Amino acid sequence: MSQSNEMTVGQAFMGGIWTEIPVLRLMLGLCPTLAVTTSVKSGLTMGLCVIFVLVCSNFVVSIMRNLLKPHLRIMMFTLAIATFVTIADMYLKAFLPDMSEKLGAYIPLIIVNCIIIARAESCAAKNGPIVSIVDGLAMGLGFTMVLCFLASIREVLATGCISFSDSAVLTILNPIDKGGWFTPWRGMVMPVGAFITLGLMLGAVNQLNRKKM
Amino acid sequence: MDTLQALLLGFISIVLINNFVFTKFLGTCPYLGVSGRLDMAFGMGLAVTFVTTLAGALTWLIDNLFLIPYGLEITRYVCYILVIAGAVQLVEMYLKKFFPPLYESFGIFLPLITTNCVILGLCLFLNLWEIRSFPTAVVLSFGAGIGFTMAICIMAGIREELELVDIPDCLQGAPITLITAGLLTLGFMGFAGMIK
């Protein structure tokens, strides 16, 4: 992938949302994608955390990009990222304890999420703060979109409905235990469902891209 | 005798039943990226095993000797990532000096594994599972590395065969690898419940 040194705000935004959408195009950040997409709610929480960390770390990295020595670069990136992940983790523990319990170790694992280091390296270390922030926001949004899409497929097939909280449940396929016709696919919440759904999704995206050309 | 049995059970459980790749999705990026050829996959697996064992032991010691007694848990993630990056650097320098052939064969994998989620994931899970004995921590770290090596080698073996197979165009490359991985996890689910 060739990337010019200077990007405009518009390019950065479109890049994150479609042309270089993480996960689907770049194949980055697969671990959290597969692990947290058992329900839309946890996918969304994870996505928001990633947006927060990505925007903040891109901003910090782009501010100090002229001070960095080449061999210490990656070290500084990871330290900046680790700091913001700690903030996000503490916020979740304080305000959404049940979500924090459910996501467990996957929130701290944002530190080693390749998307964030890749963006720090290929965008924030070369561009000014404003472009970097927009890029972080767009990449984060693209990531969140993929997470939510994958999570909604898995949750609907696994339970027949999407639940945002105990009271707000959106039933799409009426499951059999509530008098409907749909037998929930238990495998969808398991690792099998994650891998196969993502595989088919990538296949579908490839097919779409090929038709356009 | 009891402790030995517990250690052995812990080892088997983390290699087969709670395999990090198949049940926790950790290390999926190298698992899909480097599994193209069997020899490369094996090299990656060995490098990861080495660093996980070292990093698991070190972070356990730091956690239990410094962070918890002095109430510094808030700096845990920063410490972990520093220890892992440091351990990788150390291993790299050591190998370069004393075992140049081994260093050559690891090649680019060594710096890459700093951002391998298996390692940070293992350190975090050791903390989450509240492992309070040092030998258990070391055995689990080693087991996690072995589990990763096994998973990536099985995958590489399958992918070498897949190259000869006629796959629909749109599924070529990453998609078919993911689907294969899904079927593999289905197989490994059979081990669930083997040890309570």
Image (cartoon, rainbow, N blue to C red):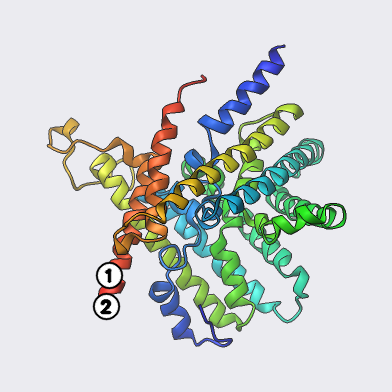
Mark 1 nearby-residue class (10 Å; few <14, some 14–19, many ≥20)? few
| SS for dot 2 | helix
Q: Chain of mark 2?
A: A
Q: Is residue A70 left or right of residue A132?
A: right
Q: Could one spot residue A179 in this view of the protein?
A: yes
Vertical side of B186 occupied by A63: above or below: below
Q: Which residue is mark 1?
A: A208
In the image shown, does A31 or B28 lie closer to the viewer?
B28
Label 1 to label 2, Cα distance in Å?
Answer: 7 Å
Q: Is residue A104 left or right of residue A73?
A: left
Q: Is residue A123 left or right of residue A46?
A: right
For the residue marked with disc 2, what is the amino acid?
Lys
- The x, y position of residue A86, in whole percent, is 63, 53
- The x, y position of residue B110, in whole percent, is 70, 56
Quadrant holding the N terminus of chain B = top right
Numbered badge on residue A212: 2
Q: Which residue in the rendered view is the most extreme toward the right?
A: B97
The answer to which quarter of the image holds residue B107 is bottom right
Numbered badge on residue A153: none
The answer to which quarter of the image holds residue B101 is bottom right
Residue name at image x 18 percent, y 44 percent: A173
- The x, y position of residue A187, in whole percent, is 32, 37
Q: How many marks?
A: 2
| SS for dot 1 | helix
Residues marked 1 and 2 touching at CB (< 8 Å)? yes
- The x, y position of residue A11, in whole percent, is 45, 84
For the residue marked with disc 1, what is the amino acid?
Leu
In the image shown, does B72 or B9 lie closer to the viewer?
B9
Residue name at image x 37 percent, y 57 percent: B175
